[in-house]
Image (cartoon, grey):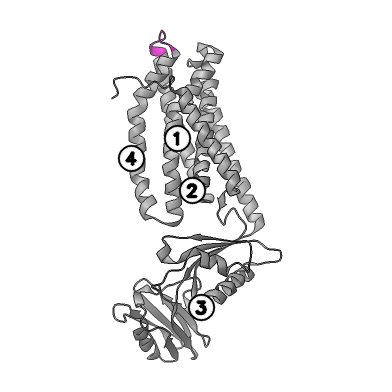
Amino acid sequence: MLTKDIPVIKLRWAAWGLAILLLVVGLVSFILFGGFNLGVDFESGLSQRIRVAPVGLEVSYDGTQDVVLSISSSALSIEQRGDAGVQVTVLRFAEYPNAASLAQALNAMDGIEAAAVDGSLISSTILSGYGFPATLSSAAVKLNFQGSGRTSIEEVRKALDTIGNAKVQTVGGEESSTFQVRLGIKDGATQSSLEEEVKGALGAHFGTGNVVVLQSDYIGPKFSKTLVTSSVLAIAVALALILIYVWFRFRFAYAVSSLVALVHDVLAMLTMITLLRLEFSSTTIAALLTIIGYSLNNTIVIFDRVRENVEINKSATLETQIDRSVTQSMSRTVMSALTTLLAIVPLAIFASGDIRLFSVNMIFGLFFGTYSSNFLAPTLLHWISKAQGKAGIKAK
């Protein structure tokens, strides 16, 4: 428990100056970077996650049964369907440690022919990408393995130069040779035509079959536009409902103060997303709405304390009441922020994909939400209430 009140009102100019400076930096970075790093759900076109990896095995089948090859983290499985029923053969990597031993085991099966392109590649590094499980036929299915070499992002960009309008980002560390490729929509193009265009360009540069598509998504322009409109509307409606709620529960000064603080939180988060070039996707919208709720809850707690203190000690100045209320709520604010951070920091470090993106956004949002609810909303309440006269801060 703090023994001395935090001089929130005294620090109001510094607090707002820092907030405005951050937002100006965000605006400048937004202009310089040409907008947000839009995810595939907000930017129509094709988005693929690829990995450059050498072909270690080629497998084909010339029999009459339906044969499906699937890959897990510990084994390669062959499922054969025929008149006699279903037969599943599992080749565990612990028993077949390299591509050569896998090829030997596959060749022992009726109708299957396997050729080891590089027999020394380790079985446990085999990759299962887009298109797996794969149905075997006379056309050989290429199986890729994680290679020892590294591929730079400049090489991938060079390979896609002939396509135009292609964006490339590294996924994970450089040693993973994994990249996110985005290709904008083209007139008359379909998902399959864009996929073939990317496949052809990469194959021409790295060799046919040496690129694994781990994930492939396609968003049409109509759906993308609808999603953007819905996301903006969701945030606007949330802020409007919050304004009405706080207005009815407290007074106009409280409502405007909390709303401005929430707008600051949203803009501050967008600033960090722009500066760090984080992907702006539907996951970002989820994080923004979550932080709006978190920040509002914290602000309401402080405003409740302000209202109580005004009723208890009407002789104290408005500045003193606000400083005391923020100080009294600080231990709760700190504990709420720390316990939330304990849950999301591990996700930001160890998770991947959308979960990691959500966690990183939440970390920034927690900081900005805590800052605005303790330093921006109370000082704005002070300004508005002073302009209205002290009665503006009293409870209904």
Q: Nearer the viewer, residue 333 or 83?
A: 333
Where does the magenta region start and end? 311-317
Image coordinates of residue 265 in percent, x first then y, are 50, 36
First in sequence: mark 3 or mark 1?
Answer: 3
First in sequence: mark 3 or mark 2?
Answer: 3
Q: How many residues crowd around disc 1 within 10 Å: few (fewer than 14), some, or many (20 or more)?
A: many
Q: Nearer the viewer, residue 131 or 387?
A: 387
Image coordinates of residue 302 in percent, x first then y, are 41, 25
Image coordinates of residue 74 in percent, x first then y, are 34, 73
Q: Nearer the viewer, mark 2 or mark 1?
A: 2
Q: Secondary structure at mark 4?
A: helix
Q: How many residues crowd around disc 3 within 10 Å: few (fewer than 14), some, or many (20 or more)?
A: some
Q: Nearer the viewer, residue 372 or 277?
A: 277
Numbered mark located on residue 209 in the image? 3
Q: Secondary structure at mark 2?
A: loop
Numbered mark located on residue 379 in the image? none
Q: In which quadrant of the rendered image does the N terminus lie?
A: top left
x 53%, y 42%: residue: 270
Q: CA distance from mark 2 to mark 1?
A: 19 Å
x 42%, y 73%: residue: 127
The amino acid type of the residue labelled 4 equals Thr
Numbered mark located on residue 276 in the image? 2
Q: Which residue is mark 1?
A: 369
Q: Secondary structure at mark 1?
A: helix
Residue 231 at least partly seen: no
